[in-house]
Every structure is written in C-alpha cells, then in structure tokens.
Image: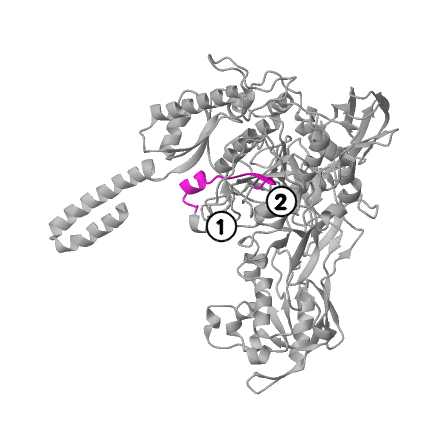
C-alpha cells in the first residue's frame, strides 16, 4: 500500500511549478528511503524456530522448584501423554516462552505460532529479521534458525514380502496384525471414507487409553474424522499461513487429504486387508497394509501446491509423541541439508526426532527421490531409519504391433484393441481443427475440441509426448479421455525427445492405449506412418493406411530379478554438513518396495494427474517405501512391546537380504553415459543393509541396541562441531564422548576416512534362546577386515562384545564394501554391512 501511495503522489507532482516539483521530489525520495528502511525492519517477516535454555519434557530430570521430573526413567517406561507432572511442566515452559517474547517485543509486532515443550524447548515465531537478530542476542536463547520448506518424498507387496504366509499367521492372522499399535503419519492428511480405512467389515476397535490424540471435525460435513481405525486426525498449518502459502479454498483447513499422498502412505502401512482395487471396470488385485489391524493417527503438514514447513512438521511430531504414537512415518524431508548448523545431524527437525526416539517412538523416513546420483539423501541421522525404494517383481509391460509386422515394446495398463484387430492410425497433427493451436499443444491430445472427431473416430490416435507430461500439465489419463470423447479405437503416445530424469510409469486407462518410451521406436512409428499416409499437393492427408493393434496390458508379469534399487531412489554416502563432506554413518539403512505401489487415493487428490478423481493410485517414490517399513516395524513392536526403536531398527537391518529372488546379488537401476537406464551391481550406498525380510526381522536372534546417551556421545564425537551447539539444539551436554562417530553401536559400520588401522567395537544382545555364533568377514581387497572372537556363545538375554579391525591395504580413492556375518547354530543369521575409504596415513 505504501508504494502505491508514493506512485500517486509522484504522479500529482506534474501539476506544480518547477520549484515545487524539485522540492516535492526531494521529500518523496526521502520518504521512500525511510519507507525502505521501515520495510527492512518490520515489513519482511519470516518464520523462525528458536530453542531456549531449559530441558524439554523428555529430558527434564528435575531441579526447577515446584515441578517434578518428567524424563525417561532408566527402569520405567516414560509416559508423556497425560501425567500431571508432564502437563504442569509443559505449561511452565510455554509461560517462559511468552514471558521472553513479551520482554523483548511489542505486542502485535510478532506472532508466536507454536510452543515446543515435549521434544525440544522452544517455539516457532513469525517475526522480522531484525527481531530475529535481537532474539539471538537475548539471554537464555540458544539457537535461532530460519524455517525451511519440506517436500514429499499396495496389492502385491505383502505377498512379495511374504507377510500372509510367513508373518501374519504368527501374530494371529491378518485380522490381528498390528493390533493396538498406533502409527503416526506426518503427511498430507487422509480421506477417511476410503474402504482401506473403514470399520464396516472388521471387528470393532476398542478404546486405547494410552493414546490421547484428538480428532478434528470436518468443517464442511461436521463429521468426525475418526472411526476407531483412524484414532487421531489433526492438521498443522500456522507456519504455512504466516508465510502466505496457505489457501483454505484448495488446501483444506482440516486433516482432509487434498493431495492423495497421505492416504496412499497410510494405506500402505496400515490399510485394511483384502480391499479390491477397481478402476475403469477392471480389478487389479486386493490391497492391504503391512499391519492391517494397526491404528492410524493423522498429522497433516503437507499441502497441494507448496509442500510444507519444518516448524509445522516439528509441531506435528511433538504432538504425535505427546499423543502416544508407537511408530512415526515420515514420507517427507527437507529440500537440502541444513545450512544454519555445523552438521546435518543438528537441526530442530532431527533434534525433535532424536527426542521422539528417546520417548520410545520408532521413526521411518523416506530417503529422498534424488537418485541415481550420489549424496542425494534428505534423511541423515543415525536415530532415524532411512528407507530406500525398490522395484519389486511385478512389471506391467505391453506392446504395439504395426501393420508392417514390427512389434514395439511400450507401457500400457489397458485392454487390447477390440477383437485383437488392427485399426488405422491417425496423427493428431493431421486432424487439427480451428486456430487455437497457439494457446494449447494439440499434439498432447489433452483437449478433444482441437481435433476433428470425424477423422479420429474408429481409428487409433497418435499423440506426442511433450514436456507438459513431465511438468504435470498433461497426463496419459487426459489423453485417454480425449481419445474416448472422439470415438477413437485406441491411442498411442510416442516419446520423440528424451527429457533427463523423466520416469515413465504405466497408467491404468479404460480404452486401448500405449506409451512408447524408446525414442528409436517412436521414429519407426513415424516413418511407417509417413510412408503409409497419402497426401494431396498441399501435404494434407487423404487416406490413412498405417495400421496397428495394441495388446492386452492388464496382467502383470512377475520376475525373479527383484528387488532392484529404483532409479529415483536417493543414494549415499551420507553427508555430515552443507559442504557435502562424507559422514561416518551408513545411509540409507534399508530397502523396501517403492515402485508402482497400488494403494488408496483421495478422489480430490491432485498429486498425480493420472489419478485425479480415482479411489486408488499406483505411485512410485521413497514415500511409498517408508510406510512399508513403518508397517513392518509395527508388527515387530506388537510382538516385542518393550523393544527400543534402535532394537527394532537393528532387527530390520541385520536380517535384510543382499540377494534377489533369483539368488543373485542385488542390482541397482542406474544411468549409462547416454542417460539410458541400465542395471549395475548395487552397494550399501544404494540399499543400506539390504532388502527388508519381515519374517526374519521378527526373529533376529541378536540385536544391537543404542541409547539416547549413545546418540549424544555420537554427536559429541563429530569433528568440528562445537559442544555448545550440541547442547543448544539437543538440550544435552557432552559429558562423555566417543573416540570416533563409528563407535556408535549401530547395525552398520561406515568410515569415510580410514588411515592405517582402526578398531571398532559392537555389542550384541541375544533376544532368543542361548545360541553359539560363528563370525566371519568379507571385504574388498583394498581393506583388510577382521572380527574377534571368531566364535562365541551368547546366553539368552545376555550381551557380548565384538571387536572389528579395519586396515588399509591400498589407496584407490573409492569406497570398499564388506560385511560381518554371524551364523548361529539355531539358524539365526546376523549381518552387519561395512563401508570404508582408505587414505595414506
């Protein structure tokens, strides 16, 4: 408004004399300069996350008069959901936040969005940069960080993972799998009316007193989002609103899923069993979550157009842990490593998750979709289970047969052309109507009104694949609707130019259709079409003689060469800072199905243009891999309710497979030099410990456990990180340190800079009957790997220490990969992956 006023005032100057004009110009320029300074001081507001002195609920051991300790007792399980001590102390911290802000700033010049008091002690605030600087200098303030954006990172996978026969029966069958375990989904909300979340055909869900989350009411229908299966539903958007990104007309100020992503991930982890996946009159199998009886708690932080903000996510995580969830699924991640802290492990998001783990909550997070390139992970810390995405054994293939006898492979989840007959091909560019082609690309076949129905009817419509398909403004679904509206016998979408990073997936359509992704095959179609089309002197088509038929692509083909690491799945090494220096942490942790996953969808979801208005979607991403692990973790938690998150993570990792279904080493999809996808032998930087094996994870034999104090000592051992910064963000002091980050008792070993010889110790605990283990090692020849003792007997419930020695043999400038394998005489196998890069000492 201020700049508009200046414009009007300047315009009015021309009515005055030259003297008055000059004087008024000086006044106006001075006023403009003052307004510029005021805008700098107060006009530009951002959201900041602030931590202050004082322990949060999860770490408070007492010491403040009038407030009892609330921290985890070493021998008792903590309850931070409803105790009077927790409530009282949390309110005390919130009051401190308000008093601090009131002492520094005038009311109305800032807006406190959230008080964080359970996992970290601090708040999110909308304020100016000058106010942020004043807050940084205020006594008692530890850390001030500008908010960051975050982004989003099944009918067959239960069978692929062996759940119906190998896992669910041990827990009482699918109708008991995950019973009374609560999985929290920090995502885009949920579509509560979906049959994957209904309770109509299931035994009633009883009350679960230990969970205290609330259920918001849909402001439009005035109906409760919860039904027993869905046990909690809340939305968090204060930071998004403060940033001006939130639009209530399309983003829904409720837990309702306006995107589709949240419903999809919730159904993968905990959707009902045996839900028919029907689309366009065809059934593509029956969907089920990994833990179909688990409860679903929804914490909406993602929105249609902009994603979300870390301060909203931290608030959601705080609330989820306070409510009493057992498992957290995070199919979200930051856009890049944090820039405001010395290391990737230290930021409010990861600090909140560290406290969540301390409170007993297992966290599964998507690795990211930046693959196949190295160092593209968006999940960094060892207390998080980072999940990479695999291609499972199901593929949807199809082919096109041309009239000249050539058979071209393609993607087409569609029925065959009528009677398996051939039909004439007509190209969209030959059947144009009108003059509106400047505004729209008619070759995309997105708008039937641009094409001549009389010429298309009864023929196969040939369409082009432009960048609009990559950007999401064009879709295969829309091509099928155009072809159907014009009465076409089917359609072909042909890719003439390859766009780097483009991922082609089969799309279910209700008329014959195929996508030809190979540019060389597209050339064959075009050459055949041009040779077979008769034209007049002006180049206008007179007779279409090119023919083709499209095969039936509805049935999947199963392959033994699975799983494979998906092309898009982010790769390691893990990085310890914004300059992308390698960390001494192996990431990702584990591999789970994440490619072409069928699951529930919100009919008003807009995340995938090909599934707008549908009840199910087949989607790919590490977002789909993470809930597989969250659901399997729920099954482990159900069987072992006292296990720590680290114990569950260890059980998943040490039992993972490094061989595919055919018994060959796992392979990863990768680009060749010409950006053509190829398969290469996978490494731990692709898959972590390997592909998840749910049956083995429920009975791991040995586990490697890790405490909260161990994680703090790990942080304190990270080079070049000030101990004061660790205390500021985590609230825990460096009273003791490890000699090296690799000394963390994790179920993997990663040494980014191995000089000479380094010794690492690991402690294993027997969670089965007494068993004798033989220990062997295997490593690339550049590094010598030894483990002792060579054999050991571990009593039931007892722990034993293993000493691992790594020695540089030759320096190559690349990582060496290996493993420590422990085989028990009762059939248990425990595997610890090892990665190291040798340097001259």
**Residue tagged by mark 2?**
199
Say which residue appears at 60% left-offset and 42% top-offset: 331
Q: Is residue 779 magenta?
A: no
Image location (x, y in percent) of residue 787: 81, 25
Q: Is residue 521 above or below residue 206?
A: below
Image location (x, y in percent) of residue 831: 79, 33
Label 2: how many residues lie within 10 Å, few (<14), some (14-19) or many (20+)?
some
Say which residue appears at 74% left-offset and 51% top-offset: 679
Kindly identify which numbered label has been placed on residue 192: none
Contact? badges 1 and 2 (CB < 8 Å): no
| Quadrant hosting residue 585 | top right
Q: Is residue 629 above or below residue 75?
A: below
Q: Secondary structure at mark 2?
A: loop
Q: Secondary structure at mark 1?
A: loop
Say which residue appears at 75% left-offset and 70% top-offset: 407
Q: Is residue 245 magenta?
A: yes
Residue, far right: 825
Q: Nearer the viewer, mark 1 or mark 2?
A: 2
| Quadrant hosting residue 718 | top right
Residue 527 in sight in this render: yes
Image location (x, y in percent) of residue 25: 19, 47
**In the rendered view, does 394 fall on the left or right side of 116?**
right
Image location (x, y in percent) of residue 626: 65, 41
**Residue tagged by mark 1?**
305
Q: What range of the chain is rendered magenta? A: 227-246
Q: Nearer the viewer, residue 13 or 72?
A: 72
């Amino acid at each position: 408004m201020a700049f508009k006023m200046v414009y009007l005032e300047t315009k009015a100057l021309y009515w005055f004399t030259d003297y008055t004009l000059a004087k008024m110009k000086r006044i106006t320029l001075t006023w403009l300069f003052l307004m510029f300074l005021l805008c700098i001081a107060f006009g530009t507001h951002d959201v900041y996350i602030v931590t202050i002195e004082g322990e949060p609920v999860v770490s408070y051991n007492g010491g403040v008069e009038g407030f009892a300790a609330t921290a985890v007792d070493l021998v008792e399980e903590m309850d931070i959901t409803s105790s009077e001590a927790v409530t009282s102390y949390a309110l005390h911290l919130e009051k401190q936040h308000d008093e601090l802000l009131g002492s520094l700033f005038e009311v109305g010049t800032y807006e406190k969005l959230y008080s964080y008091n359970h996992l970290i002690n601090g708040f999110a605030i909308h304020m100016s940069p000058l106010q942020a600087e004043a807050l940084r200098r205020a006594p008692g303030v530890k850390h001030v960080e500008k908010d960051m954006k975050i982004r989003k990172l099944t009918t067959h996978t239960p069978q692929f993972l062996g759940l119906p026969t190998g896992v669910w029966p041990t827990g009482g069958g699918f109708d008991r799998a995950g019973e009374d375990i609560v999985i929290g989904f920090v995502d885009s909300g949920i579509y509560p009316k979906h049959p994957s979340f209904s309770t109509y055909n299931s035994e009633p869900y009883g009350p679960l007193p230990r969970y205290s989350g609330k259920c918001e009411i849909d402001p439009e229908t005035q109906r409760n989002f919860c039904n027993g299966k869905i046990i909690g539903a809340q939305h968090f958007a204060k930071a998004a609103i403060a940033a001006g990104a939130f639009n209530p007309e399309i983003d829904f100020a409720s837990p309702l899923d306006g995107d589709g992503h949240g419903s999809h991930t919730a159904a993968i982890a905990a959707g009902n069993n045996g839900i028919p996946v029907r689309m366009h009159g065809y059934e593509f199998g029956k969907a089920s979550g990994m833990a179909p009886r688990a409860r679903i708690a929804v914490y909406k932080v993602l929105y249609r157009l902009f994603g979300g903000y870390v301060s909203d996510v931290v608030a959601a995580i705080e609330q989820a842990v306070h409510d009493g969830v057992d498992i957290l699924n995070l199919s979200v991640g930051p856009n890049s490593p944090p820039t405001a802290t010395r290391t990737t492990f230290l930021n409010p998001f990861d600090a909140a998750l560290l406290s969540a783990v301390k409170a007993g909550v297992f966290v599964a997070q998507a690795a990211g979709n930046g693959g196949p390139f190295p160092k593209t992970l968006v999940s960094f810390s060892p207390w998080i289970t980072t999940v990479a995405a695999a291609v499972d054994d199901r593929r949807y293939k199809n082919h096109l047969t041309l009239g000249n006898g050539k058979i071209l492979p393609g993607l087409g989840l569609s029925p065959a052309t009528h009677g398996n007959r051939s039909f004439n091909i007509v190209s969209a560019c030959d059947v144009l109507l009108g003059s509106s082609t400047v505004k729209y690309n008619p070759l995309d076949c997105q708008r039937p009104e641009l094409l001549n129905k009389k010429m298309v009817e009864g023929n196969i419509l040939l369409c082009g694949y432009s960048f609009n398909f990559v950007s999401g403004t064009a879709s295969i679904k829309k091509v099928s609707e155009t072809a159907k509206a014009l009465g076409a016998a089917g359609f072909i979408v042909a890719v003439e130019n390859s766009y780097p990073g483009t991922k082609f997936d089969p799309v279910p359509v209700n008329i014959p259709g195929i996508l030809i992704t190979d540019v060389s095959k597209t050339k064959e179609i075009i050459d055949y079409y041009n040779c077979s089309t008769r034209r007049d002197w002006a180049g206008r088509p007179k007779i279409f003689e090119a023919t083709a038929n499209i095969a039936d692509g509805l049935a999947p083909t199963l392959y033994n060469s699975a799983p494979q690491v998906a092309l898009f799945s982010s790769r390691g090494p893990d990085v310890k800072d914004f300059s992308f220096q390698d960390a001494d942490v192996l990431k990702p942790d584990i591999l789970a199905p994440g490619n072409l996953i069928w699951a529930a969808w919100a009919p008003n979801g807009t995340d995938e243009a090909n599934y707008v208005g549908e009840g199910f979607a087949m989607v790919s991403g590490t977002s789909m891999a993470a809930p597989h692990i969250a659901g399997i973790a729920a099954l482990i938690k159900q069987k072992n309710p006292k296990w720590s998150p680290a114990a569950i993570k260890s059980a998943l990792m040490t039992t993972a497979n490094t061989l595919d279904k055919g018994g060959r080493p796992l392979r990863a999809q990768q680009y060749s030099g010409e950006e053509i996808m190829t398969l290469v032998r996978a490494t731990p930087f692709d898959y972590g410990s390997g592909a998840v094996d749910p049956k083995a994870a429920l009975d791991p034999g040995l586990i490697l456990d890790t405490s909260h104090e161990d994680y703090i000592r790990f942080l304190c051992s990270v080079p070049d990180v000030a101990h004061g910064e660790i205390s500021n963000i985590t609230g825990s002091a460096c009273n003791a340190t490890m000699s090296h980050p690799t000394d963390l008792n994790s179920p993997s070993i990663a040494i980014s800079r191995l000089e000479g010889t380094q010794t690492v110790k690991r402690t294993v605990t027997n969670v089965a009957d007494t068993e004798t283990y033989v220990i062997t090692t295997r490593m690339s020849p550049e590094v010598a790997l030894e483990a002792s003792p060579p054999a050991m007997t571990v009593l039931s419930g007892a722990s034993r220490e293993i000493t691992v020695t790594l020695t540089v043999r030759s320096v190559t400038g690349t990582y060496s990969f290996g493993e420590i394998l422990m085989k028990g005489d009762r059939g248990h196998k425990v595997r610890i992956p090892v990665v190291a890069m040798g340097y001259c000492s």
